[in-house]
Amino acid sequence: MKETAVGRVEISRAALVHNIREFRRLIGPRRKFLGVVKANAYGHGIVEIAGIAVAEGVDWLGVNSVEEGAALRRAGIEAPVLVLGYSPLASLEEAVVQGLRLTVYNRETVARLAALAGRLRKTVRVHVKLETGTWRQGVPAKDLTAFVRDIRRRPGLVVEGLSSHFANIEDTTKHDYPRRQLEIYRMACRELEAAGPRVPVKHMSCTASTILFPEPGFNMARVGIGLYGLWPSKETYLSCLLDQKELLALEPVLSWRTRIAQLKKVPARADIGYGCTYRTTRPTVLAVVPVGYFDGYDRGLSNTAHVLVKGRRAPVRGRVAMDFFMADVTDVPGLKLEDEVTLLGAGGRERITAEDLASWAGTISYEILARINPLVPRIVV
Ligand SMILES: Cc1ncc(COP(=O)(O)O)c(C=O)c1O
């Protein structure tokens, strides 16, 4: 795919492969490694990332929706794919046809899957999600055994996995809440297995818990943000230091680049952009950048972010509009039309990180990455 008017997202294969190897080392050879490629692989491009991940030994892929799973199958990816998000009843037939694993926690979903398994003569593998305190998806612990029993009595359905998800691991260096969640999982799992056969695949970890609590009881780790070369949070990094754990050397995978659409001399005391929120304090050279909030460059970056031009930082001036924003390039000599602008990534000796953009926009790196519009071409370099 070629660069378009709004530029390109570059995906570093070397960085991705490096991060996969770091996590494989941590997860070990015996536990399964699920690469979380939902949300267009956190904005990196689901098909591009999944292809490299599977070639590099990632065992399973995690998607949000049946549509994302089907896109992987259409791209020829045959690895096990687990749908982590909600699968509407109307999407279940496609899931069964594509051989996707589904996260289940509603009896209606189970009944519909059983009917489809019979009609289509397929085996459907499900992962039951246990509620341990995130209060998002999941079956309450007290109902788990009966829920699983109901699935097991239905021909064509196989309970392959038991999963849960941490609520409060990235935001703090105090980890008593996730430890309580682990305890709820263990107790519910013990009770379930006392009443019937073992569940083959047990998984609860995300990047932060894979780094902080490599729990022996689980045999699959679900790694998202770490694959893309980012720490989940400062607190996770700090927890690692406090616990004297090894600090993984992660390498950011994504860079986002575009080109100058116009260079413009502006007098002092000119009001820039919508709402006239910035007034120049000197004769200024502005670079008009053809990217806006439609492309995922957050409006919260107005008057706060920097971009890189010829390895130098240039501040964003005025509001980020739908398709454009302006940067002050007065101090960067020798620029011309269509010179490169780095919105995220390295340029010369400088680097703008997803964490920088997140703190400028008042959000987290996950959101900065995941919201880069899928229409911006992803180019593997
Ligand atoms: C169910 C589930 N598992 C795993 C992950 C991966 O989390 P992380 O990106 O922090 O590794 C997510 C991410 O939101 C998730 O929703």
Image: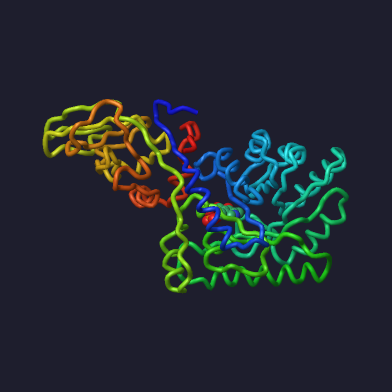
In the rendered image, residue 244, in percent from the top left (x then y), is placed at 45, 73
Horizontal side of 367 relative to 114 (left or right) equals: left
Nearest the eye: 375 or 346: 346
Ligand 1, image quadrant it occupies:
bottom right
User: Residue at 27% of width from left, 42% of height from top?
Assistant: 311
User: Residue at 40% of width from left, 51% of height from top?
Assistant: 363
Horizontal side of 303 relative to 168 (left or right) equals: left
Q: In this picture, is 19 found above or below 306?
A: below
Colour treatment of the image: rainbow
In the rendered image, residue 299, in percent from the top left (x then y), is placed at 36, 40
Q: Quadrant of residue 144?
A: bottom right
Horizontal side of 340 relative to 9 (left or right) equals: left
Nearest the eye: 253 or 38: 253
Nearest the eye: 349 or 296: 349
In the rendered image, residue 83, in percent from the top left (x then y), is placed at 66, 47
User: Residue at 48% of width from left, 70% of height from top?
Assistant: 245
User: Residue at 68% of width from left, 62% of height from top?
Assistant: 30
In the rendered image, residue 168, in percent from the top left (x then y), is placed at 52, 64
Horizontal side of 377 relative to 116 (left or right) equals: left
Q: In this picture, is 62 found above or below 138?
A: above
